[in-house]
Every structure is written in structure tokens, then in C-alpha cells.
Amino acid sequence: MPEKSIFSKKMLRYPNVWFYVDSSITCECRETVYLIAQSLEKHCRIVDDFDPNFRLRRLLFHSSEGSDMEAWHKGLQTYTDLSNPPLSHDHQLHVRYYFGDLVRGKSERVELNLEIIVRLFGLTLDKWR
């Protein structure tokens, strides 16, 4: 995993989910990010349907914790505060993509040792070949 130092200082915490895509599926970083984003949208309903004004602010001021793109899944669980209704809200999952920093840091490509992964997770290598 790359050092946190290659990421923008605006990124508050180290990414906690990583997607590894075999280079035989797609070879360009942006194509890979698009494949992941489309898969998350299709299968997990994680979408970039933010308000156009929010998107413009994100582009102009590089907000969103230094990410290149982001998406979310709204309405995961409703929080209702009966004593203070304005605090009631739906919980959300936010996903931020940091591919630009990986490319600039020459860390967008890695080699995975499947033997180690298989041992770590107690899998059989037959499933992966």
C-alpha cells in the first residue's frame, strides 16, 4: 500500500477500502476507476447524484477532502430524534476516489502475490486461476 504522503494534505485519513483490478481487464487508470464506479452504482446504488451547485463548488475549490470524484448511498438508516426533530436525518455512505494522487505518486500499479492472499483468507488457489 502506498505511503499516505503521496496523497493530498486535504485528505483527512488514509483510504480504508482499496480496489485491485487485474490489468488484463483494463489497462488505464481512468478506465479502471470508471469500471469500479459503474459497478458500485449498479450493484450497491452508490452514485454521484450530488446537487449541481455542490459539484461546481467541488470543482472550483477542490473540496471533498482532496478526492478526484465521490459518490454516496443515501438512506441507509434513519436517525430520529423525537426531542429535537431538526436533528433527524438518514445515514449515508460516502465514497471518495483518489486516483490522481496515485498516478502522480507512480503508485497506481501494484503486483499482488496471490499465494499470500489465499493463505491470509484461507482460500484455495483453484478459485483464482
Image: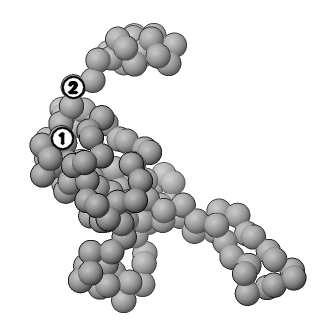
Q: Which residue is mark 2?
A: 111
Answer yes or no: do the residues labelled 2 and 1 have beta carbons within 8 Å?
no
Q: Quadrant of the C terminus?
A: top left
Q: Nearer the viewer, residue 76 or 103?
A: 103
Q: Nearer the viewer, mark 2 or mark 1?
A: 1
Q: Position of residue 56 (x, y in %)?
A: 29, 85
- Would you say residue 31 is visible in this rendering? no
Question: Compared with residue 4, is residue 98 higher up or lower down, i.e. above or below?
Answer: below
Separation of residues labelled 2 and 1 (CA atoms): 11 Å
Q: Position of residue 100 (x, y in %)?
A: 19, 56
At 12% from the left and 52% from the top, the residue drawn is 104
Report the amino acid beneath label 1. Ser
Q: Which residue is mark 1?
A: 107
Pointer 2: residues within 10 angstroms few (<14), some, or many (20+)? few
**Regarding mark 1 in the picture, which secondary structure is present there?**
loop
Q: Is residue 34 left or right of residue 26?
A: right
- Would you say residue 118 is visible in this rendering? yes
Q: Is residue 98 left or right of residue 71?
A: left
Q: Position of residue 21 (x, y in %)?
A: 28, 37
At 19% from the left and 42% from the top, the residue drawn is 108
Q: How many marks?
A: 2
Q: Nearer the viewer, residue 45 or 102?
A: 102
Q: Quadrant of the N terminus?
A: top left
At 25% from the left and 59% from the top, the residue drawn is 8
Tell me the quarter of the picture where residue 97 sits: bottom left
**Regarding mark 2 in the picture, which secondary structure is present there?**
loop
At 18% from the left and 36% from the top, the residue drawn is 109
How are the colours assigned in the image? Answer: one colour
Report the amino acid beneath label 2. Glu
Q: Position of residue 123 (x, y in %)?
A: 48, 14
Pointer 1: residues within 10 angstroms few (<14), some, or many (20+)? some
